[in-house]
Amino acid sequence: MEDEKGTPTPIVTYLLLTVIVMTQIYISLLRPVDAKELYDAFSLTPVNLFSLVQVDSLLTYMFLHGNLVHLFVNSVALYGAGVLVEREIGRLKYLAVFLVSGIIAGFIHCILNFGSEIPLVGSSGAIFGVIAILFLLMPFKLTFTLVVPLPSVVVGLMLVLVELSALWMANDIGIAHDVHLSGFVTGGLSAFVLDRKRALKGFFIATVILAIIYYIGAYFNLIPAEG
């Protein structure tokens, strides 16, 4: 299916967004007790996963969100990156990257938080996987993933640096930064599987830009000196 200009319609992205939004609307209409039961049944809880209970939650957790803000942020990011990536690599490969990134990110989170009874919800890990494809295969493509139009290489670097900093300082309780980074790494590896030469080129471009940013920061004393 294509639009009037012959551009492939990002059907999978639209379907994913529809399922995610409609699920949250449905949850918001439930009584609090019923909503809690639904979250308990379909969110990803490490202790349940390794007890071989609710193994399917590795998939279902991606379609639940904690609140409307969480839903809005992920929906904007999914639309901004998903439309471009789906049109570039095709619907089936795109869907595979989304699902595999989300599943692996959730599984790694459970390994790192073995025995935790805190449930995990959200499609962030899957979306970070999609962003990694955009980051490596289309580094100069403008994207609205962060609302403001920016080259995807800039978006990717910003997100990775922010996530690494947050994970290192552990100052964002309640946000699973390990899921974000795991999803990004999974998507990055997928980019190399899809097109190794383009992924290498994208990685080289990102490395050069990161080095330039670092040296500019050091030159203007924006980066604290070690002492």
Image (tube, helix red, strand yellow):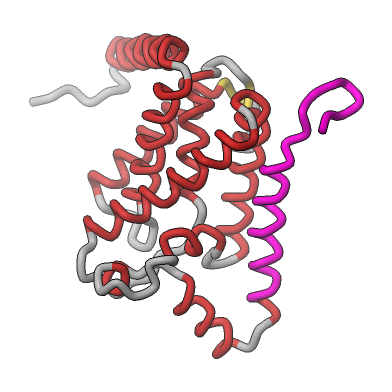
**Does the magenta portion include 12?**
yes
* Residue 214 percent location from the top left of the image: 31, 16
Q: Is residue 145 visible?
A: no
Q: Which quarter of the figure is the N terminus placed in?
A: top right
* Residue 39 percent location from the top left of the image: 50, 76
* Residue 49 percent location from the top left of the image: 31, 68
Picture quadrant of residue 82: top right
* Residue 131 percent location from the top left of the image: 51, 33
For image coordinates 73% across by 41% down, the residue present is: 11
Q: Is residue 215 above or below residue 145?
A: above
Picture quadrant of residue 19: bottom right
Q: Which quarter of the figure is the C terminus placed in?
A: top left
Q: Nearer the viewer, residue 199 or 73?
A: 199
Whether residue 93 sits left or right of residue 58 in the image: it is: right
Q: Is residue 51 visible?
A: yes
**Does the magenta portion include 211?**
no
Q: Which residues are magenta?
A: 1-27
For image coordinates 29% across by 72% down, the residue present is: 52
For image coordinates 42% across by 26% down, the residue present is: 157
